[in-house]
Image (spheres, helix red, strand yellow):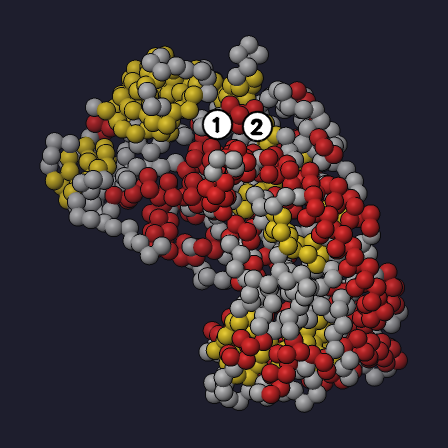
Amino acid sequence: MRRVYLDNNATTPVAPEVFEAMKPYFLEDFGNASSIHWYGQRAKAAMESSREQIARLLNARPNEIVFTSGGTESDNTALFGIVEASRAEKKHIITTAIEHHAVLHTAKALEKRGVRVTYVRAGSSGVVDPADVEKAIGLDTVLISVMHANNELGTIQPLEEIGRIAREHDIYFHTDAVQSVGKIPVDVESLGVDLLSLSAHKLHGPKGVGALYVRKSTILRKLLYGGHHERDHRPGTENVPGIVGLGKAAELAGRHLAEGITRVGALRNRLEDGILASIPLATVVGDKSRRLPTTTNISFDYIEGEGFVIAMDLRGVACSTGAACSAGSVEPSHVLSAIGRTRQQARSSIRFSLGRFNTAEDIEYTLEVLPRVVEQLRSLSPHYKKDAAGAQPSGSKAKAVAER
Amino acid sequence: MLPAPSPQVPKRRLWLSAELPIPMTIAVAMSGGVDSSVAAALLAENNSAAGSNGSPAVIGMTMQLWNQRRLPSLLGSEEGEPGRASGRCCSLDDVYDARRVASFLGLPYYVVNFEDRFEQEVVRPFVKSYLAGETPIPCSLCNTEIKFAQFIETARKIGADAVATGHYARVRKDPDSGRYRLFTGRDPSKDQSYFLFGLTQEQLARTLFPLGEFNKEQVRAMARARNLPVAEKPDSQEICFVPTGNYRGFIDAYLNEQGRKLEDAAGDVITTDGRVLGEPQGLGNYTIGQRKGLGIATGTPLYVIGLDRARNRVVVGSNQELLKSRLLVREINWIRSVNEGESFEARVKIRNKHFPADARVEARPNGEAFVEFTTPQRAITPGQAAVFYDEDEVVGGGWITRVLD
């Protein structure tokens, strides 16, 4: 069976060049980067070139890059780190209702420790209004954390404006850029961020490694205690092969950026247009004009997302109902709920996320399989049958039933 | 590579339901227990490599029915604390086991979430029946409403033609009438047909019970012979979503979650001849036939004869008074074709562990039936199912409404 991978927002395959770059650091150059000897020096040198590669991609300085175990640790370090370093008596942070759980649940944990948190809502477009962020600012606000691109919708948040606001009020500004780095230009200067989280496995690097950009002179309390690694930001023997992989992945991402936006963007558009043309009662969720070129979120009326994903998988196409971390949960996506989608609508939403290894054939195969899957699911949906039968005499009533 | 099937299973024994396409795609419900794991293994060995429409021939699925973390007080742990869920239903351990077996058998595997529907169709009626003074049996409802309604629907949606479960029961199609007939499992001690009386013809037509011809020892042996990761896992007994079998604790916690309370209104423990012996400690604490724990000392042993929710009464009496012959049954599902007004001899089973007894069954209007046992039966309990058998065949069944004097 042909297999097509359209879940690149969950994770991506490691690029062959990345894998090659990592290999020596398992067997030959295995040293501990903190060691004095030749082995240690080899590892240390590899790590530092990785830091440079990442800094280049972000328009940052190498000494502003801290390696972590991934996006979640980066987010935790940013939020806890800023809040705990602040000496203010009362502390307030501002984030959004559409953040990834790595930020959202960290904010909830801070709330339990007495920190005031404002969750700025996003409109139906899936984009936060900078004015709402500004309105939430108080004298006690120590941090603003707004994601760059939303993982479920792909919508891009207006970080430049929010960055300006943060600077005017002299408040630290963090962004979870896990979904945007490598897909669209990410420049810490133009975005005006003080902290930025990224993860290797979302950009064809290995799992279990990521980085946190920390602007020079940002005061951050560390999360873990141990040795004085990473300029005392993050103890623990460095994951050298992973870090090398991240560096290589960042370098490749920079090189493929333009291609990704045009070629992958065209594939995404072909997929989206093909679906909308062949499937009735399908709509794109989120602002189409402010999106990652790789992502589309489509809501199919009368379809239970869970069944759709399984049926597609059994025909070789991998997609998802939302964040992989919440798959299997009965609760509708918090992102879709936050932008005002009903429970039913949220459950009928499917995310297709492309990557640079997708081909035109992948999209054509998907467009071939998908209408049959939708038809199969709808033909067995009691509501669909009822509404289809009752559409003539009482369309509005049938609609009400379907929304239930 | 799969280990050689042993003991050898004749292929035809698995396909007890006719008129399904060959090749076909079968979704097998996997609970993580031995039975459903062996059922999945037998299907994987006997079905062809590819099913219909190019789908895999056998798909493993687990129904997530209940979230154990919802009522943390029942688990003796704080909300959000991981890993202490000891309850049976849908615990992470069971999903883990099912996934392990599916991967061992090389089956695609999915967890499907039916929590909303399960609560609506099983848990709420269970609580309601309990509060009405009945002793409900949620497994039959779960089979009808979830396993053989929602599951078949979902299975068909993802492209499966039929479903299979690890129940000990058998389905056959009657070549003359075209009706599907339901039989007990070949092993009387493990027979689960009692819980399956609610299956419709449409559901039976799409259902396979690969274990129907086997007994438990054979199933265990097959699990061991195949080195299934769950071969030595103990059987589960209690109602899946009620950990440790504590009905009252569950209902208490469930109502509490909704800001309600299990009310223990004042009432009486009263004898059949009208003597008030004391006050009941909540009707929910009593089941018909119960002797111990009445908290009343009398010369002769006393048993719970009936529960009267309206007056909050626990009626007690002698063992002799527990014996009753006549009862009314509601919401009958006829698996064999039975007409209203028809009356027939059958063996009737009134609870899972009851040995079916001879009776006359009369089909009445509005999906009701009247049952009269030849010899009185002990502790006939409203809320439980009454299932009618002709030899090893299930004729039909329903819910016990009332016991008549």
Q: Amino acid at mark 1?
A: Leu
Q: Are marks 1 and 2 in contact (CB under 8 Å)?
A: yes
- Name the residue at 57% across, 81% down: A143
> Do we see residue A171 in this rendering?
yes
x then y, percent, for residue B380 = 30, 28
Q: Amino acid at mark 2?
A: Thr
**Residue at mark 1:** B199
x then y, percent, for residue B21 = 67, 24
Q: Is residue A365 left or right of residue B98?
A: right
> Do we see residue A236 in this rendering?
no
x then y, percent, for residue B238 = 44, 41
User: Quadrant of residue A21 in the image?
Assistant: bottom right
- Name the residue at 67% across, 34% down: B58
User: Quadrant of residue B104 in the image?
Assistant: top right
Number of marks:
2
Q: Is residue A311 left or right of residue A340?
A: right
**Residue at mark 2:** B207
In the picture, the quarter occupied by the N terminus of chain A is top right
Q: Chain of mark 1?
A: B
Count neighbours of disc 1 (C-alpha within 10 A) and say few if under 14, some if 14 to 19, many if 20 or more.
many
- Name the residue at 55% across, 10% down: B176
The residues bearing labels 1 and 2 have C-alpha atoms spaced at a distance of: 10 Å
